[in-house]
Image (cartoon, rainbow, N blue to C red):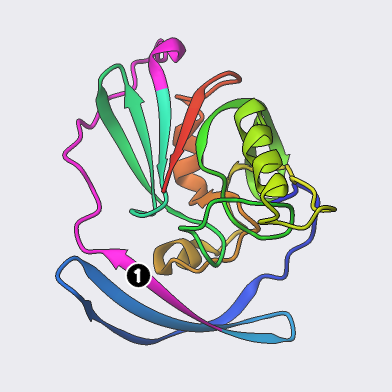
């Protein structure tokens, strides 16, 4: 999600149906308006998406930033904070319309998978705060060139960029709760969760994005 690109806010969001899907998932069908377009989206949630984690109390002196790693689990739709060897936070997240697809090229609205780092932090973003990832990194570029070589993407495709972890506009938390795939490939969490994440993250913090 480019930091300065306007994306129409989804409105008139309704849950059309929700039912069990197999033994592990819930199938949810939602409908919303995005600008002049009416969108129907099917979302699959794991019933039990959270691991057991320790609710770490942030000390007044702050945390040791070198001990922090961020894990983004697209399947579970979660952002986790690992402090040392323990998971100490779990935040609900949403992505683009096809969250389990790995990013292939600019414009596909998919979230890249792999290991990245926080490149910069914008505290004045239209999405509350924006933690920019170092995508594309060397690993992403190598994969992109392989896709081109194998003709899996057009020869004139671009790799894209401006992928990060960010918040949402005022009053938009329902989109996070319902799992609406509104981003262009970024990871969106609630603003209050993003504010807490600020205590853990800094430029250089490792971020691993899993399918």
Q: Which residues are magenta?
A: 40-68
Left or right: where does residue 105 sit relative to residue 187?
Answer: right
Residue 121, image x, y percentages: 66, 30
Q: Residue 18: within the magenta?
A: no
Residue 57 magenta:
yes
Q: Position of residue 169 (x, y in %)?
A: 62, 58
Q: Is residue 211 above or below residue 81?
A: below
- The answer to whether 78 is drawn above or below residue 124 in the figure is below
- Place of residue 175 in the rendered image (x, y in percent of width and height, measured from the top left): 49, 67
Extreme right residue here? 156
Give me the residue at 44% from left, 11% from top.
66
Does dot 1 land on a helix, a strand or a loop?
Answer: strand
Q: Quadrant of residue 26?
A: bottom left
Whether residue 38 is visible, yes or no, is yes
Q: Residue at x 35, y 70 (%)?
A: 44
Q: Which residue is mark 1?
A: 44
Which residue is painted at 56% across and 21% down in the image? 202
Left or right of 202? Residue 88 is: left
């Amino acid at each position: 999600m480019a930091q300065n690109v306007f994306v129409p806010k989804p409105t008139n969001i309704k849950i059309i149906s929700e039912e069990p899907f197999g033994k592990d998932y819930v199938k949810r069908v939602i409908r919303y308006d995005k600008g002049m377009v009416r969108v129907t989206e099917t979302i699959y949630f794991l019933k039990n998406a959270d691991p057991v984690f320790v609710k770490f109390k942030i000390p007044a002196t702050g945390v040791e930033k070198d001990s922090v790693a961020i894990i983004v689990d697209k399947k579970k739709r979660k952002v986790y904070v690992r402090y040392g060897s323990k998971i100490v936070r779990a935040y609900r997240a949403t992505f683009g319309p096809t969250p389990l697809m790995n990013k292939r090229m600019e414009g596909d609205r998919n979230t890249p998978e792999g290991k990245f780092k926080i490149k910069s932090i914008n505290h004045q973003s239209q999405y509350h705060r924006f933690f920019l990832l170092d995508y594309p990194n060397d690993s992403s570029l190598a994969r992109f060139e392989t896709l081109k070589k194998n003709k899996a993407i057009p020869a004139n495709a671009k790799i894209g960029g401006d992928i990060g972890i960010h918040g949402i506009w005022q009053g938009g938390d329902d989109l996070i709760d319902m799992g609406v795939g509104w981003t262009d490939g970024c990871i969106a969490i609630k603003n209050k969760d993003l504010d807490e994440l600020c205590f853990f993250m800094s430029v250089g913090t490792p971020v691993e994005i899993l399918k």
